Image (cartoon, rainbow, N blue to C red):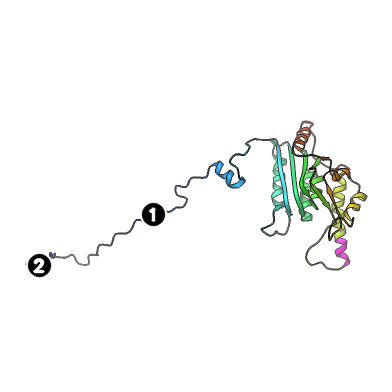
Amino acid sequence: MPGPDINPNPVPNQPATPPPQPQREPARGNIGHRPASPEVENIRELGQANIPDFKSEIHCLQIVGQIEGHLVMPPQNKTTKYEHIIPQLVAVEQDPSIKGLLVVLNTVGGDVEAGLAIAEMLVSMSKPVVSLVLGGGHSIGVPVAVAANHSFIAETATMTIHPIRLTGMVIGVPQTYEYLDKMQDRVIRFIVEHANISEQELRRLMFQTGELARDIGTILVGQDAVRVGLIDEVGGLASAVRKVKELIAAGSPGPGRRH
């Protein structure tokens, strides 16, 4: 019988034929990935496919939740960071295509110095500013609301006026209370200078007892805020936008001081 087919002159040290490698699927990364369309991005970010695409001469600034200052709030808190607001105000002041500013507030207050910083930026602008309180403009949100040429409040919106409160460890020495008095005076002075309310009336509302549970202060609802001179007028979005346009047409400067 014939033997197996053997090469009589084999090549020395010839490597064995490697086994066939399985083909790999292309990576599912960014290769071939198309960016999402604007409609998809709007659905993902805003919950709707189409949003108005209109270039306005009025810039809308939103201050919602808690005004976050030097301390970072827990992630479950809705916050407005003052380090985000201040660059926006600087950009609005420099942008020649923006003629006026509409500030919409629905805030529970927050960091005193951060709120005062935003308020001081607003009153120092050269362009007209109109504020609109929706839902609430409480605590340090009050100076922000009055830091405008004209202020509006919705009929059902509320504003809480109360003394400054501290959280955490407080050193029980006279200097602590003097510091609180100075900070309180800063807030009161700012509100009185930019609203139509007297210091005596503001202090009375601030230190009134019996209206707030576990605290002293006053809750003003809609027309009540107008009656005491804290807010200029009861109104909504249409009224606020119309007022900004009137101030722009009249060439009105920024808020500045009223008194």
Q: Tell me the crowding category of disc 1: few under 14, some 14 to 19, or many 20 or more residues within 10 angstroms, Cα based.
A: few
Q: Is residue 186 left or right of residue 90?
A: right
Using the image, tell me which numbered label, if any, was put on residue 3: 2
SS of the residue under disc 2: loop
Image spot of residue 183 (x, y percent) = 84, 57
Q: Position of residue 62 (x, y in %)?
A: 71, 46
Indicate left or right for 96 with 182 as reference: left
Height in image: 165 above or below 228?
A: below
**Amino acid type, callout 1:** Glu
Q: In the current view of this chain or complex, which residue is farthest to the left?
A: 1
Residue at 88%, 57% in the rendered image: 210
Pointer 1: what residue?
Answer: 25
- Image point (34%, 56%), residue name: 23
Kind of residue indicated by mark 2 = Gly
| Residue placed most toward the observer, 126 or 39 | 39
Residue occupying image coordinates x 72% and y 59%: 71
Q: How many C-alpha atoms fall within 10 Å of the one at disc 2: few (<14), some, or many (≥20)?
A: few
